[in-house]
Image (cartoon, rainbow, N blue to C red):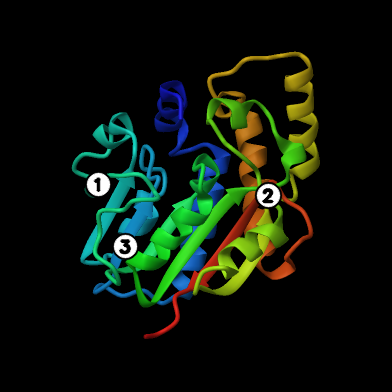
Amino acid sequence: MNRDVYDVEAEVASSHWWFVGRRRLLSRLIAALRPDRTWRVLEIGAGTGANLAVLAGIESRLVVACDVSVDALRRLQNRATLARADATSLPFMSDSIDLLLAADVIEHVERDDLALREFVRVLRPGGHLILTVPAFQSLWGPQDIVAQHRRRYRRRPLLRLVRETPLSVTTCFHFNYVLFLPIWAARKILLALRVRVSSENQINTSLLNWVMTRAFGLDVDTAPTLKPPFGVSLCLVATKPPA
């Protein structure tokens, strides 16, 4: 990603409605897996650490934050064990990770299939993957450009991609569905007007953030059960079969 995107994320991640809501969703998904303190946890594409508070809450013996960007990792010093690596070539032993989180990562990777194979390799038998990706190419907008996304995903192709690995999919659902139409319209307007932004996360006010936080909170609370047919993002949880 562009350095400006990291700068904005580091500034707003603690309170911005998107990061607050995504952490809320991840917390519930992780709790449902019943983690314990023996787990080794790895986040791929940790960025500036927006999700580290959720992972730290597991109180596991090891939390590793991995990113390809040195600039991002510098911001995470003293917050986790750090590793610099590409998602398609991870410096970890096979069958060593209990929980792997890749939140909005594989859309940046040219060979997302190779990244998924690496995720499978490092997961222990019975280990879990939580994956989130941006959904629907029709939602392509300024954030995709500045974040250097290669693609957005549809549910069936994503499931097909994951099912080409040994992983067993537990659930796959859209989220951020409540705000789908406003976000779609806003992105079309920004593209039509050729508005340049360092990050869409800068387009915010205190009142807007308050409203969006509550709307998105309702969204992530209901999406795993309702499984709406559309949303700005997709979430998938899968497990590596026992040996």
- In the rendered view, tell whether residue 79 sits above or below residue 126: above
Residue at (76, 61) in percent of width and height: 228
Q: Nearer the viewer, residue 103 or 114?
A: 114
Q: Quadrant of residue 156?
A: bottom right
Residue 108 is tagged as none
Q: CB of mark 3 within 8 Å of CB of mark 1? A: no
Q: Residues within 10 Å of mark 2 (few under 14, many from 20)?
A: many
Residue denoted by label 3: 41
How far across and how far down the image is residue 198, in percent?
53, 20
Disc 1 on helix, strand or loop? strand
Horizontal side, residue 42 vs residue 181: left or right: left
Q: Amino acid at mark 2?
A: Asn
Q: Residues within 10 Å of mark 1 (few under 14, many from 20)?
A: many
Indicate which label's residue lies in the foreground, 2 or 1. 1
Residue at (63, 41) in percent of width and height: 151
Residue denoted by label 2: 176
Q: Residues within 10 Å of mark 3 (few under 14, many from 20)?
A: many
Residue at (45, 81) in percent of width and height: 241
Residue 83 is tagged as 1
Q: CB of mark 2 within 8 Å of CB of mark 1? A: no
